[in-house]
Image (cartoon, rainbow, N blue to C red):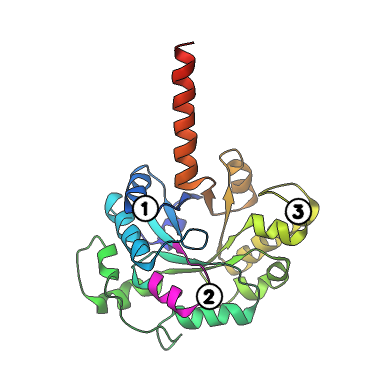
Amino acid sequence: MTSFRSALQSKSCLLGTFISFNDPYSAQILARCGFDWLMIDMEHSPLSAQEMTSMVHSTVTASAGSCCPIVRIPSHGVEWIKWALDSGASGIIVPMVNNKEEVDAILKRALYPPAGQRSFGPFRAPFADMAGSMDMAEYKRKTAPIVAIMPMIESVEAVENAEEIVGAQGVDGIFIGPVDLRHSLGFEGSGGDEDAYIAALQRVLEMGKKFGKAIGILGTQESVPRLVKMGFSFIMLAGGDAGILAEAASAKLRASRESIG
């Protein structure tokens, strides 16, 4: 399986989208489309740990290991962190991380001793590896150290504490949640040119450069060139599986109706 870390080093920007349907079939289809990564969204979709684990494995096998499954967990709880990591995911995205105390607690739960206190039992993680080994010790030795731990910065408080969050040892990257960040700033929507919003993005990007950490964000097809130019290393295309299905179905239906007058 291609690690998310190595994928970031091999391309100027990784493009992905998210999965909200609670069926591995959705992950298989999108993984075969050529996305660099897929975010399995447990935060805003009621996915179970079992469904998430199946989607992680489906993403890897359907793409022959070229598409990285990243799990966005619903909260900072040890159970969510443990289940997501034990699935064999290439990384986790943790929502609403606002300060150093919170990021330190996440890292303690996500890393094996001596760096942290992660409990050992990745029984299903080997099935997310195309190598075919069932050796959990090999997972701990080779894979666990390169799994990406990525907090989300999506509030004014988090932007103010960006240096401590981004610079924390064990953090591999940051994903910016633009909608919640904009709400925190008093704005609506998922994007805009307000000075305060742009300044917030630039501060996080500056911290990414300072500490050599990848910064990602939600974006549209139209905004990708601008976001890449700003310095974002990975982008999650808006819409996800549900949005892509609705857009494609509507376009096909509209074209068919127009063809018959």
Q: Is residue 241 magenta?
A: no
**Residue 73, how many percent across, how many down?**
48, 67
Say which element carries label 1.
loop
Q: Position of residue 228 (x, y in %)?
A: 59, 47
Q: Which mark is on residue 67?
A: 1
Give the magenta range. 71-84
Apparent side of residue 192 relative to residue 12 in the rendered image (left or right): right
Q: Which mark is residue 187?
A: 3
Q: Secondary structure at mark 3?
A: loop
Question: Is the residue 43 above or below the residue 23 in the image?
Answer: below
| Residue closer to the observer: 80 or 10 | 80
Q: Residue at x 60, y 79 (%)?
A: 102
Please state which amino acid type lies under the numbered disc 2.
Answer: His
Q: Earlier in the sequence, mark 2 or mark 3?
A: 2
In this figure, which residue is indicated by the disc labeled 2? 76
Residue 108 shows up from this direction = yes
Q: Quadrant of the N terminus?
A: bottom left
Alpha carbons under labels 2 and 3: distance apart: 26 Å
Residues at marks 2 and 1 touching, judged by CB atoms closer than 8 Å: no
Please name the amino acid that badge 1 sits on: Cys
